[in-house]
């Protein structure tokens, strides 16, 4: 059973940092990659970042590079999303998503097999 579980959301001020965590599964050998997506009110779901489980290769939405950092700790079975210099436009529900197989397109939400329930991040101005 693969059921990602997110944590770490909350209310912060603009300029603050926040780290989200995801425990992707109890069965990590079945994981190829873990990603974060976000959904803001009135907007489409948006790819944030992805990390491959075995080798730790990372991919980012171009506009978030330099502010957001994704990492995985295989010993702790955790994927973290470090978010710095947060802006009000970062306000969204952030979802952890797991894929079991390699795909060339890592930004398409349809390419992920399992999703968490989401964690709310609110950035006040």
Image (tube, rainbow, N blue to C red):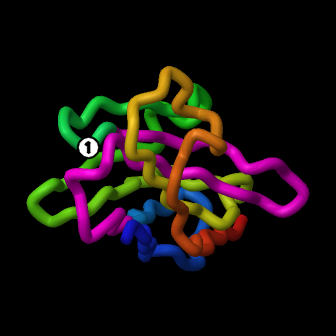
**Badge 1, how many Cα within 10 Å: few under 14, some, many 20+?**
many
Secondary structure of the residue carrying numbered label 1: loop
Q: Which residue is mark 1?
A: 53
Image quadrant holding the C terminus, namely bottom right
Q: Is residue 50 magenta?
A: yes
The quadrant in which residue 58 appears is top left
- Left or right of 54? Residue 94 is right
In the image, 65 versus 61, the foreground residue is: 61
Q: Residue furthest front?
A: 1
Range of residues picked out in magenta: 22-51
Instruction: Name the residue rendered at 77%, 59% in the picture.
Output: 40
Q: Which quadrant, please, contains the N terminus?
A: bottom left
| Residue 32: x %, y % from top left | 33, 41
Expressed as whole percent of the image width and height from the top left, the position of residue 95 reads 56, 62
- Is 58 inside the magenta-drawn segment? no
Tell me what residue is drawn at x 51 percent, y 74 percent: 9
At 58% from the left edge and 71% from the top edge, which residue is drawn? Answer: 118
Which residue of the protein is positioned furthest toward the right in this rendering? Answer: 42
Q: Residue drawn 38% across and 54% down?
A: 82
Residue 26 position (above or below residue 55): below
Q: For residue 6, what is the image quadrant?
A: bottom left
């Amino acid at each position: 059973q693969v059921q990602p579980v997110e944590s770490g959301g909350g209310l912060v001020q603009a300029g603050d940092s926040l780290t989200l965590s995801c425990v992707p599964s109890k069965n990590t050998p079945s994981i190829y990659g873990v990603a974060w997506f976000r959904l803001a009110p009135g907007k489409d779901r948006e790819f944030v970042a992805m990390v491959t489980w075995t080798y730790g290769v990372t991919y980012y939405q171009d506009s978030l590079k330099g502010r957001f950092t994704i990492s995985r700790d295989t010993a702790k079975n955790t994927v973290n999303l470090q978010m710095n210099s947060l802006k009000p436009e970062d306000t969204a529900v952030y979802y952890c998503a797991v894929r079991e197989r390699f795909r060339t397109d890592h930004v398409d939400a349809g390419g992920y097999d399992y999703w968490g329930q989401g964690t709310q991040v609110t950035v006040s101005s």
